[in-house]
Image (tube, rainbow, N blue to C red):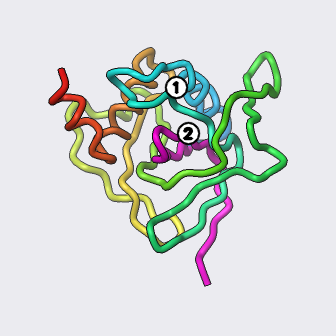
């Protein structure tokens, strides 16, 4: 039987690869996801980012990796602080490629050593720390996701 998890977090996808945003309530998960959704396909993402799930992310171990998805009742919904719950374009699921733990800016090292992987459904997943409210945070997140999926190499070759 496949291992599953119900995770407090937000997940977005680019070209079928997902990043899971984790952090305490109010850490900026939804805010960072919303700003990522505004990034068009281009040098930081080969396709426009899409929401998978906000607030609750379901994960299941499959033969090909960890698939993340949102509960049906929350599909396409994201909390926008000060506005409420809004509908945004979404995808039903994607394979998890990266976990981003949202932290305070002072916790970020300038040139960090690789972090220990996150364990999701018993599987190791690359993990980074990110300060979510920096102006460059969406671009940093998309670059880190591209590094994990091999897209960054092709982006560098094309520039």
Q: Residue at x 56, y 25 (%)?
A: 37
Q: Would you say 151 lies left or right of 63 here?
A: left
Q: Of the residues under marks 2 and 1, which one precedes in the sequence?
A: 2
Where does residue 84 sit, x and y in percent of width and height? 82, 23
Q: Would you say 74 lies left or right of 63 here?
A: right
Magenta-span inclusion, residue 141:
no
| Quarter residue 53 falls in | top right
Most foreground residue, 53 or 21: 53
Q: Residue at x 44, y 29 (%)?
A: 131
Most foreground residue, 55 or 97: 97
Disc 2, SS: strand
Give the Cα separation between the discs numbered 2 and 1.
8 Å
Assess whether mark 1 and mark 2 are in contact (beta carbons under 8 angstroms): yes
Where does residue 22 sit, x and y in percent of width and height? 55, 45
Q: Is residue 75 above or below residue 65?
A: above
Question: Dot 2, how many residues are within 10 Å of its Cα: few (below 14), some (14-19), or many (20+)?
Answer: many
| Quarter residue 47 falls in | top left
Main secondary structure along the magenta-highlighted residues: strand
Q: Quadrant of the N terminus?
A: bottom right
Residue labelled with disc 2: 12
Q: Is residue 11 above or below residue 122?
A: above
Magenta-span inclusion, residue 14:
yes
Q: Is residue 68 above or below residue 46?
A: below
Label drawn at residue 62: none
Residue labelled with disc 1: 36
Q: Which residues are magenta?
A: 1-22
Q: Would you say 105 lies left or right of 56 here?
A: left
């Amino acid at each position: 039987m496949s291992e599953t998890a119900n995770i407090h977090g937000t997940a977005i996808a680019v070209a079928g690869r997902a990043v899971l945003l984790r952090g305490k309530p109010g850490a900026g998960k939804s805010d960072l996801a919303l700003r990522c959704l505004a990034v068009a396909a281009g040098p930081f993402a080969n396709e426009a980012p899409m929401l998978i799930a906000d607030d609750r992310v379901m994960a299941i171990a499959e033969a090909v990796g960890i698939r993340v998805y949102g509960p049906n009742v929350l599909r396409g919904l994201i909390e926008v602080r000060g506005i409420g719950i809004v509908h945004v374009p979404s995808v039903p699921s994607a394979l998890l490629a990266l976990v981003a733990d949202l932290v305070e800016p002072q916790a970020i090292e300038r040139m960090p050593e690789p972090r220990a992987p996150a364990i999701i459904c018993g599987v190791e997943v690359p993990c980074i720390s990110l300060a979510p409210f920096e102006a460059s945070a969406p671009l940093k997140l998309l670059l880190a996701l591209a590094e994990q999926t091999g897209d960054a190499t092709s982006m560098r070759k094309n520039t």
